[in-house]
Amino acid sequence: MHELPVVGGTSSSACESGSGGSCGSGGLVALETLSLEPRRRLPRWLKRPMPSTEMSFTSGVIEDLRLETVCESAKCPNRTECWSQRTATFMILGNVCTRPCGFCSVPRGKTEAVEADEPQRVAEAALRLGLKHVVITCVTRDDLPDGGAEHFYQCVLAVREKTGAAVEVLTSDFHGNREAISRVIAARPDVFNHNTETVPRLYHRVRRNAEYQRTLDLLAQVKQEAPGMVTKSGLMLGLGETLEEVLEVAADLRAVGVDMLTIGQYLQPTPNNLPVDRYVPPEEFDEIGEQCRKLGYSFVASGPFVRSSYHAGEMADLLARSATA
Ligand code: SF4
């Protein structure tokens, strides 16, 4: 469900020049003693623009309405760009997650009470930002009997009623609770998104407490109950997966009717999260995107900065246009 994060402190490593012994804090020996791995320098294609003053309007709305965003919680690398364009992805059901996913920087621990007025606050924020396509995601709430499905339902309805905008949900797996998933489907979101995140071999490290089959089942259920509803999923690259594995996952997702696929680079959000195994060059993203398109997806976005909700409105528009062309 989560967005892909950015490296915490991207220029952080005292040793990023690669000259080991030049570290001010004692050099290579000290690093070895402390069992710390030097942080890697970001490749040139992963540099992002500096913050702009336009961002303050978006952050003001978010702050004023006491909302959480995955943009901030997951340290998304696109925040400068998206917030400057008054776009954000709302994260409902609190800012504490019940799952220990290795890639994600959202805090985990004791969850917060669900706030009954949150649907109205999300709707108000969408209105003030002038959003035409609203993406709503959540923390995973295994502590709630319905995983927060009813609250999700209320948020979708509130946003639609107040703004008339299209709504995309980016949900947890609801622990496979089919009734809960049905409740979210009943809200008739324009896009039902649930991220696969990685290949099944890496689930125990990347998505602990989740199951690959459960994700496929959820996406299949959406298509069974609402055949016309657009379904979407996303993958991160750079965690140790192989190309063959990625294409197998893409084929599995297509086999359960997924319409849209997003593929982006994993970036380590904090030193406590999984390290990046590899920075995938843009040309390789292009090639993978091409191969996935051949599987019959209506829309594939593949690139280092692609995230589930990055330009989500434009993606949905393109899909709608290609369907009517
Ligand atoms: S890509 Fe999504 S999560 Fe990242 S800043 Fe943009 S809207 Fe937020």
Image (spheres, rainbow, N blue to C red):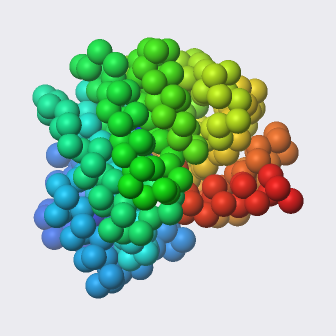
Q: Is residue 192 above or below residue 320?
A: above
Asked where in the image residue 145 lies, by quadrant, the reply is: top left
Q: Is residue 101 above or below residue 230?
A: above
For the question of whether residue 112 can be seen, the reply is yes
The C terminus appears in which quarter of the rendering? bottom right
Q: Position of residue 236 (x, y in %)?
A: 53, 45
Q: Is residue 314 above or below residue 149?
A: below
Asked where in the image residue 295 lies, by quadrant, the reply is: top right
Q: Residue at x 31, y 52 (%)?
A: 122
Residue 263 lies left or right of residue 49; in this view the side is: right
Q: Residue at x 43, y 75 (%)?
A: 85
The N terminus appears in which quarter of the rendering? top left
Q: Position of residue 87 (x, y in %)?
A: 41, 66
Q: Is residue 148 above or below residue 283?
A: above
Q: Position of residue 37 (x, y in %)?
A: 30, 50
Q: Residue at x 19, y 33 (%)?
A: 114
* Residue found at the far front of this picture: 161
Pick the front one: 153 or 48:
153
